[in-house]
Amino acid sequence: MLSKRTGGYLKRIYKVVIWFMITIICFAAVFFLYDLPVSAVGYAALLSGTCGCLLLIFDYRRYAAACKKISYLLFQEYPVPEELPLAFDSLEEEYQQLVKRIYENKIQMEQQSAATYEDLMDYYTLWVHQIKTPISAMNLLLQTDESENVKALSMELFKIEQYTELVLQYLRLGSTVNDFVLQPCDLDDMIRQVLRKYAKMFIGRGISADFCETHKRVLTDEKWMVFVMEQLLSNALKYTPRGVISIYSADENSFTIEDTGIGIAAEDLPRIFEKGYTGFNGRMDKKATGLGLYLSKQILDKLGHKIVAESIPGAGSKFTVTF
């Protein structure tokens, strides 16, 4: 059974082999018609065949080396045209020139896309920082009044601030260079930061927070990890009309956020980390973006952490992050 490489080579040279065989037959016919000695035909055929075989062996070795180099390049993450083997003929040379042109166009398009992305990042970063100024001013104004309407407005303003932060983190995550800094962090301190931020929402919705201190230090990026915790806690609050949200650690390398909310439908559970997927609960809420859990999963993947979701519809959900 011929190998794929040998079969490809034979297909490449089959016309030359046919021409060679026709040439030998022509020589044999001429020798036969002129009644020349048979030994002369045999010597001529043997000499021609030997020279032809030597040339084919040399050509095949060159072909096999080129195939081996191309196979090696195929397994490289970022192959470049300059590493291609030498062209056999002018046609292959033109193909390689075409590959180089396509590669150069690709690099140029990537550079243009990166420049456009950077401009977009600069704009949205500026936009988020600018919009935080009126949000902070409105928060200060609302703190002077303790009426129920003002409390409701404060809660909605808090949500606006969270949505603007979500936009910024979404754009940052898509950048080719992320500012991840892995270092030992106090897990309890990160959890407290998030609980303090969402304290008003807990009070406003009448939901209890049950936090069991873990006394752990974990290797992670504090800024991004706090963002993930915020998304998980925000989701728990959003879909828990009453009851309690518990934050605890079941083992040495993880923490869990568990709620007593409406839960997640079994058919939605495998897809909740997909981009833009809101599921049945999100469709009922009509305000869900499907980005919070997606971003959380992407961030945790980049940090080398894992997240597992468990849920019983009508009884609550549980999200466990493993470091």
Image (cartoon, rainbow, N blue to C red):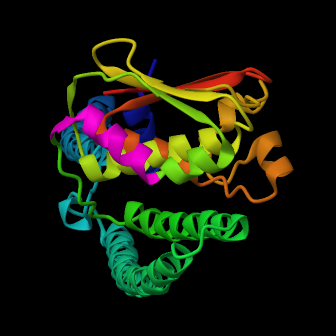
Q: Residue at x 39, y 82 (%)?
A: 129
Please tell me in which quadrant of the rendered image residue 214 appears.
top left
Q: Residue furthest right?
A: 284
Magenta part of the chain: 184-197
Q: Is residue 188 left or right of residue 273?
A: left
Q: Is residue 11 above or below residue 155?
A: above
Count the marks.
Answer: 0
Q: Residue at x 24, y 46 (%)?
A: 221
Please tell me in which quadrant of the rendered image residue 261 appears.
top right
Q: Residue furthest left?
A: 183
Assign the magenta stretch its main secondary structure.
helix
Residue 17 in the image: state x and y as whole percent.
Answer: 42, 44
Q: Is residue 277 left or right of residue 23?
A: right
Q: In this rendered view, identify the residue nearer to me: 298 or 72.
A: 298
> In this view of the protein, can residue 26 be seen by the observer?
no
Please tell me in which quadrant of the rendered image residue 75 appears.
top left
Q: Quadrant of the C terminus?
A: top left
Q: Residue at x 58, y 51 (%)?
A: 201
Residue 135 in the image: state x and y as whole percent.
Answer: 50, 79
Residue 94 in the magenta stretch? The answer is no
Q: Is residue 139 above or below residue 64?
A: below
Q: Is residue 39 above or below residue 115?
A: above
Residue 191 in the magenta stretch? The answer is yes
> In this view of the protein, can residue 199 be seen by the observer?
yes
Residue 183 in the image: state x and y as whole percent.
Answer: 14, 41
Q: Residue at x 28, y 33 (%)?
A: 188
Q: Residue furthest top?
A: 251
Q: In this rendered view, identify the residue nearer to me: 106 or 72.
A: 106
Residue 24 in the image: state x and y as whole percent.
Answer: 40, 43
Q: Is residue 197 above or below residue 68?
A: below
